[in-house]
Amino acid sequence: WVQRAVIVMRAKGVEFDVTYINLREKPDWFLKISPHGKVPVLKVGDVNLFESNAIAEFVEETVAPPLHPQDAVKRAQNRAWTDFVPTFSSGLSATYYAKTTAEQAEGFDKARAVLIKLEEAIANQRGNDGPYFNGPKLSLVDASYAPFFQRFAAADEKMQSGLLNDFPLVKAWSDALLATETVTGSVAESFPQEFAGNMHRRGTVIAPLFEAAA
């Protein structure tokens, strides 16, 4: 969810600084400003804002250009599909967080179930030719899904599942998001190593496909 906030600010041209922390060893100063001990936290002057949705909506309301559609119905649909992100992300991550091949097989079934819903939404509700969710410009929906497409892509580079090939509209959307520097530049340079390290720490079935990382 940190990445989502960064994508939103990059899309709007906001000047900002990022301080990354180790969530396994959260510093005291961070725990004092984050009530739930979660990231992201956005410091605006002397005020600390927390929770990703609240931060994204604050930036949307205070900085142009708007990333939400102007049409009220479209805007509501966008918010609804943003709320689907936790279900979507848990479906995709089940494929690479699995600790056994049996769990991974179940994970791919879970991933297909959420991808079917997303494919249908793009086909029947989007009402445009892309490449992004609302057409030619990035939106808050794009910023919400992009981090999880990026993580799946990093995992599938090793798994070689070809899962997204069965969902051409979703794949085209993912490809478009991962082709823009607004998204790819929204993570720390150490992202590949950190992702690999996470696979090893979790004891995932695909960890051997990654070089051991600190």
Image (spheres, rainbow, N blue to C red):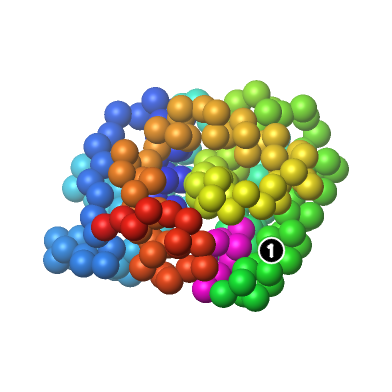
Q: Does the magenta run of residues contain 97?
A: yes
Q: Is residue 46 above or below residue 96?
A: above
Quadrant including the C terminus? bottom left
Q: Position of residue 120 (x, y in %)?
A: 82, 48
Who's the residue at 62% across and 49% down the image? 160
| Foreground residue among 120 and 24 | 24
Q: Quadrant of residue 56?
A: top left
Which amino acid, by three-letter code, is at mark 1? Phe
Q: Position of residue 131 (x, y in %)?
A: 68, 28
Q: Is residue 112 above or below residue 76?
A: below
| Foreground residue among 151 and 82 | 151
Badge 1: residue crowd in 10 Å (few <14, some 14–19, many ≥20): some
Q: Does the magenta run of residues contain 180?
A: no
Chief secondary structure of the magenta span? helix
Q: Residue furthest left?
A: 28
Could you tell me how many numbered marks the image carries?
1
| Foreground residue among 46 and 26 | 26
Residue 85, can we see it? yes
Left or right of 89 in this view: 209: left
Who's the residue at 63% across and 39% down the image? 174
| Foreground residue among 141 and 57 | 141
Who's the residue at 62% across and 34% down the image? 175
Kind of element beneath mark 1:
helix
Left or right of 62 in this view: 166: right
Q: Is residue 19 above or below residue 14?
A: below
Q: Position of residue 124 (x, y in %)?
A: 85, 43
The span picked out in magenta is 92-99
Q: Position of residue 27 (x, y in %)?
A: 16, 63
Who's the residue at 21% across and 65% down the image? 26
According to the picture, the residue beneath numbered tag 1 turns out to be 108
